[in-house]
Image (tube, helix red, strand yellow):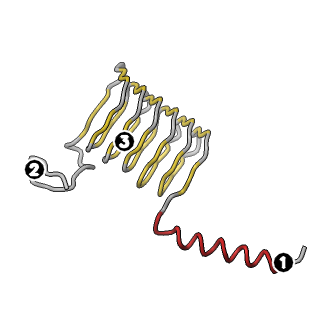
Amino acid sequence: MFKGGNGKEGQTNSPDKLNRIVEGTVIVGEIKADSNFRIEGTLEGSLDTLGKLVVGPTGKIDGQIKCANADIEGEIKGDLVVDGLLSIKSTAKIVGNITTNKIEIEVGAVFQGVCNYANQKDAPLLAKKSKMDKAEDAKVVY
């Protein structure tokens, strides 16, 4: 997919491809990237990356986010779409809707919004289960 100087393809989550916004830096606008992102500063706008997003304890994002995986320790105001694993640490504060395939939330984290589980391979099983539940409910006499 991508070829870097080390000759490895498809390494968007490799540590050698890291974008970093340090504490004290404020960026306003839209960011699109193929690699990992670590935010310790502030982003006012959207972020779309094929790599992993890490929002450190001092990091703040006010906008829409789409990424492969995410570790959140800081603050997010806006919707978050994560294709893989979303890890919400105890120091995190999220106000917005989440769509993800996998999620882990530590005790102490603050989340205000709606969480949608979007694992595509489980969708047929969930639909089948839903139909079975409806059929069972029809048989139950109250």
Side of 119 where 131 appears, left or right? right
Name the mark on residue 53: 3
Residue hosting label 2: 6
The quadrant where residue 19 appears: top left
**Which element is circle 1 on?**
loop
Name the mark on residue 140: 1
Instruction: Indicate the quadrant containing the N terminus: top left, top right, bottom left or bottom right.
Output: bottom left
Closer to the chain start, of discs 3 and 2, is: 2
Query: Which amino acid lies under the numbered mark 1 shown in the image of this protein?
Result: Val
Tell me the crowding category of disc 2: few under 14, some 14 to 19, or many 20 or more residues within 10 angstroms, Cα based.
few
The quadrant where residue 57 appears: top left
Where is residue 121 drawn, in percent x and y? 46, 69
Residue drawn at (40%, 25%), measured in percent from left and top? 42
Instruction: Indicate the quadrant containing the C terminus: top left, top right, bottom left or bottom right.
Output: bottom right
Where is residue 65 drawn, in percent x and y? 43, 40
Query: Which amino acid lies under the numbered mark 3 shown in the image of this protein?
Result: Leu
Q: Which of the two marks, 1 or 3, is nearer to us in this view?
A: 1
Where is residue 75 drawn, in percent x and y? 49, 32
Closer to the chain start, of discs 1 and 3, is: 3
Tell me the crowding category of disc 3: few under 14, some 14 to 19, or many 20 or more residues within 10 angstroms, Cα based.
many
Side of 41 where 20 appears, left or right? left
Question: Distance of mark 3 from mark 2, alpha carbons?
Answer: 22 Å
Closer to the chain start, of discs 2 and 1, is: 2
